[in-house]
Each structure stands twice: as C-alpha cells, then as structure tokens.
Image (cartoon, rainbow, N blue to C red):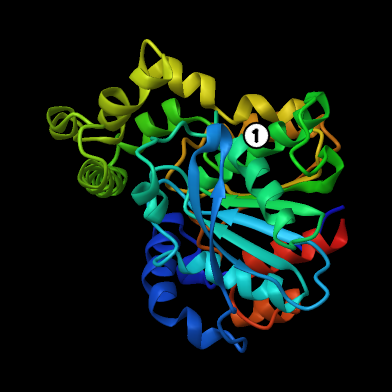
Amino acid sequence: MLCNAAYKPSRFLQNGVRMTIYSALWGKRYWEKTSNSPDLPYKEHIFRGFQDVPLYGLVAIPENPRGTIIATYGITGDLESEWSLRILARKAYDRGYAVVLFDWRAHGKSAELSPTLTSDGLFEGDDFVCIAAGAAAIGCPAKFWFVGYSLGGQLALWGNKAATELKKQTTDIGIQSNDIGGVAVVCPNLDSRRSLAYLVSYPFGRIIEARIAKNLEKLAWKIHKAHPGTLDPEAIKRARSIWGFDRELVIGPLGFPSVEAYYDASSALQLLPNILKPTLIIYAQDDPFFLPDIVDELKTACSGNPAIDLLLTKHGGHIGYINSKKGQQQANDPDPWWVWNRIVEWVEMQ
C-alpha cells in the first residue's frame, strides 16, 4: 500500500546536486530546530551480529511499544554525526515504536569493537536479523522494520533476503521470519560498479568520491590503531579511492578475485524481483550519486513484484528531500522532512 506521495520542493532545489549539497549543510545545522520532540532516552547496547561480530547500538523503548525500527546509515559516518537517523528515530518513537540505531561493520564504535571490514550487504543483511533477535531479547517488540539510506539501503535490502531465509534455518535465534515486518530504504545503492564509474565521470561526482575515499582512509587507520596488525599499513596507503579501498582491504578476506566480482555479487538490484517482505523504496531520478540508467532498471525490477512499493520522484537529490512550505501543506507534514515522514507513515500502513 502506497503512502502519501506529495512532494513539492522549492524551485531552487529542483536540482539533484543543489538539493544534495543544501540538505547536507542546512540539515546538519538546523535539523534540531525543526523538531518539537526531545532527544530519545537512548541506552547503549552491544549487539552480536552475524558470525558473532560485535556491533554498537543505541536503543530507545517507549511505553507500550507497537513495533521496532532498526536503522543504519550510508558508506561512511557514525551514530554521532548521522543526524538523518535522529530525525527518523524521533518520528518513530513519537508514533510508539522502539528504535534501534547501529554502527554497521567497520563504522563508528563498531570499528573499535572489531576489525571486521564491510561486505556491502553480503553479511550485513544477516547482521540486521541478528540485531532484531538481540533487540527482542531486551524488550523490543515485533514487528521489526529494517531501514537504511544510500549504502545502508543496500544493506537493508540484503536484510530483507536474510529475513525471508530465516524460514529455512533450524537454529532458534529467538525470532521467526514473520516477526520481521519489512524494509524501507531511501536512495539505496543498487549497483556499485556502474554507479561508481558514473560518479567519477563528472566534476561534482569526483569531489564526492574523493571525500568519501578520504573518510574511508580515516576509518581504515582507526581500525589499524584499535586493532594493531589486522590491516596492512601499506595497503591503507595504496587505497586512495573507494575502488582502491575495496581492492586493497575488502575483497581478499571475502574471497573475491576482483572488485568487479565483489560489486556484482553484492548488488542489490538483483534482489528486487525475488523480495517477499513488504518493501518501500524511495528513489530520486535526479540523485547525482547513481547512474541515471538505473532508474529504468529499477522500475522494471519492481514492476512485477507486488511486495515492493516504489516511490520514484522527479526531484530529491541524494537523501535530500527537503519539502517546500506548499509541499508540507499538501502532504500534511509538520516539518520539511518529507522522506522520513513517508517512511514512518508507510510502516504504520502495513
């Protein structure tokens, strides 16, 4: 069932690059002023992910919770800096949902707990399920809803697959497949190989790629410092791009012969025709991070699957979606955060 899709950005922000830059800069500075809700009573918790990898999380449980939202962020970041997650969390908590936010593998405080590197969904999908089981054990109720954006959206889509495959497992982890309600993702990465090639093909994209690569380098040095001997310093020095990071540090331990093979294996686009859990995908046609050709493939992949609600918008940029005053009135929203209002609304409608 589709939710209210009214989205009317201002004329100035009807450009993917402008929306992406503006929302990142303005949102970081002013998001708290747009909220009438206080910060949540978070408690720290260490979850055990797939293969017993420790993952740092923040948990907030309201009185008489009606379900649980489990969410993480994109290619770089941590729970301290990812303000978009805090917006989502406050909205979900206000509607009566328990909230679990977590630093995924090799990110934030999870990187301090373990040297385990990323796998772009291949293991992180199972991490979502393991976190749901851990959350259930501390009082978070079903149903569990997996949420992510950008690369985190790719991870959540793999979580959808892992949740479905729970039916095949004979080991009791404390929850069953039907305890997991579904997945909602914003601007998910769907094809790393082609989108990364696109990103470095034009000036703004090259600036973004270089910035991400620098953050990945910092992340690798952080792991090296916290877990001496687990990462080769020379390999870190050679990893001067996103592609280089995966080539030098990631694909070897995972057993892939090339970055191309790794990206093809972890692509989320291939998952969509076979998704069974209710899934919301919000995707902007002017997202400057991803190859535009993917839009038509996304439509095709979703068109034959009734489990997927695709909200494909003309504008929105990359996780921008700041609505105009007129758009807020049409959507009956209390603030400009159109996409996070839609996520919570969709979960409630399931």
Residue at the outermost top position: 257
Q: What residue appears at the point 65 percent right and 80 percent down from the top-left corner?
A: 326
Q: What residue appears at the point 40 percent right and 73 percent down from the top-left corner?
A: 28
Find residue 199 and report its horizontal and vertical position in percent.
35, 38
Q: Which residue is mark 1?
A: 298
Q: Quadrant of residue 342?
A: bottom right
Q: Is residue 45 left or right of residue 224?
A: right
In the image, 46 versus 165, the foreground residue is: 46
In the image, 75 versus 163, the foreground residue is: 163
Find residue 318 and report its horizontal and vertical position in percent.
48, 54
Q: Residues within 10 Å of mark 1 (few under 14, many from 20)?
A: some
Q: What residue appears at the point 72 percent right and 79 percent down from the top-left corner?
A: 94
Find residue 237 and report its horizontal and vertical position in percent.
13, 34
Q: Is residue 107 left or right of residue 127?
A: left
Find residue 281 and report its horizontal and vertical position in percent.
68, 47
Q: Secondary structure at mark 1?
A: helix
Instruction: Please determine whether, in this image, residue 271 is positioned above or below residue 314.
Output: above
